[in-house]
Amino acid sequence: MAQLSPLLKQATPVVVDHGEGTYLFDSEGRRHLDFTAGIGVTSTGHCHPKVVAAAQEQIGKLIHGQYTTVMHKPLLELTERLGGVLPPGLDSLFFSNSGSEAVEAALRLSRQATGRPNVIVFQGGFHGRTVAAASMTTSGTRFSAGFSPLMSGVHVAPFPYAYHYGWDEKTATKFALRELDYLFATLTAPNEVAAFFVEPVLGEGGYVPANTEFMAGLRERADKHGILLVLDEVQTGFGRTGKFWGHDHFDVRPDIVLIAKGLASGFPLSGIAASQELMSKAWPGSQGGTYGGNAVSCAAACATLDVIAEEGLVANAAERGTQLLDGARLIGDKNAAIGDVRGLGLLVGSEFTTADGEPDTVTAQAAQKAAAERGLLLLTCGAWMNVVRMIPPLVVTAEQVDEALGIWAEVVDTVTKS
């Protein structure tokens, strides 16, 4: 009998029968409040009726139309629709399936367009598991260990993770930018750097937001040295942070944006957006793929954009995000085991540390497990997996946030006293 790989460890013991909105129902009929959202994927909640209807209708018309062979209406419609929400000047799209594929496509475009070999990523960033993407990932060695040699040409600069350094944000930002300049002087000349790849909020790295000064510093250096600024919005895009794009909080202009996760409410779809001028510098034949821009996924994505607009989900993410972050901070303030609570919109992380300030993985894991036992599904992240993260769907209500915070308060109190 075939089995799943033993390396696929479940974060929770739940075997799902069906999902509805912010809830998952297991095979025994028990309801679970899902604050994982498929790692930020089910933006409109589980099985939103409008998304389901769009997918069902499309399945009856065309499931797969390989988009370098034939063109289909859902892809053309989605491309046009995204033109209305993409950052100004980014008017050309290439679609793929996963976030990792989008990262690799952006890497290829950056190198081909600039003729430069190197890229700079930032400490704690997650960009994927495929070879190039894993080579650019620094959120944990588990993503890149054991299959060296990795891709060359990747250099790592600090991210302004103030709590990690024990500094205020201004000091951490000044340090990060100074070290970036030092990297230019010691490891790679700026005229050999094709691109900066950066997340507006570190995802797997611990839910650490960037800031305006840091992003402005990257943009300034990119403009000065002819470097492309690539913003990885795979987890932060489509309203997740309380603005449509995570980088909207920081008033920064990207050259390339990466999209995935919340784009299609659970259907696999990703892509990169750039200006037509920049995209045209990719070499012929360098973009393609069998399943990219799948017709059903594109139909679901169009419906997702409808739901986000019609139900005011970006504003809801901002309001419910403030409620969730404020509530999580109150809980953290009462429990010495939580050293920091941070986030942006519906991305909220609680970092567990010991009395002497060291990462406390054991307590974080215990809290995540105890929450699941009480019907609240959460995940961990961070280099030491000591950050418990909350990622509810954008449709989450005030009552559901209160319910989650009530469970979380009980969990933290229990695991820190045991």
Image (spheres, rainbow, N blue to C red):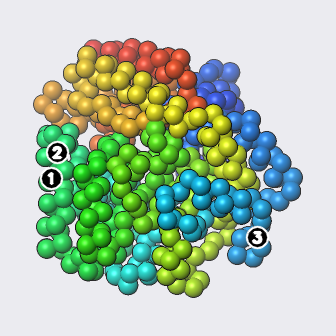
In the rendered view, would you say 407 is above or below 225?
above
Residue 5 or residue 195, whichever sits in front: 195
**Circles 2 and 3: CB atoms closer than 8 Å:** no
Residue at the location (28% across, 80% down)? 192
Residue at the location (13% across, 67% down)? 182
Q: Is residue 133 left or right of residue 289?
A: left
Q: Earlier in the sequence, mark 3 or mark 1?
A: 3
User: What is the CA distance from the residue labelled 3 to the residue labelled 1?
Assistant: 48 Å
Sort mark 1 into few (<14), some (14-19) or many (20+) by Cα contacts within 10 Å. Answer: some
Say the numbered circle drawn on residue 71. Answer: 3
Say the numbered circle drawn on residue 387. Answer: none
Say the numbered circle drawn on residue 170. Answer: 2
In the rendered view, would you say 407 is above or below 341?
above
Element under disc 2: helix
In the rendered view, would you say 131 is above or below 295?
below
The quadrant where residue 193 appears: bottom left
**Which of the image's four quarters has the C terminus?**
top left
Element under disc 1: helix
Residue 210 or residue 130, whichever sits in front: 210
**Circles 2 and 1: CB atoms closer than 8 Å:** yes
Residue 320 or residue 348, whichever sits in front: 320
**x%, y% of residue 312?**
59, 34
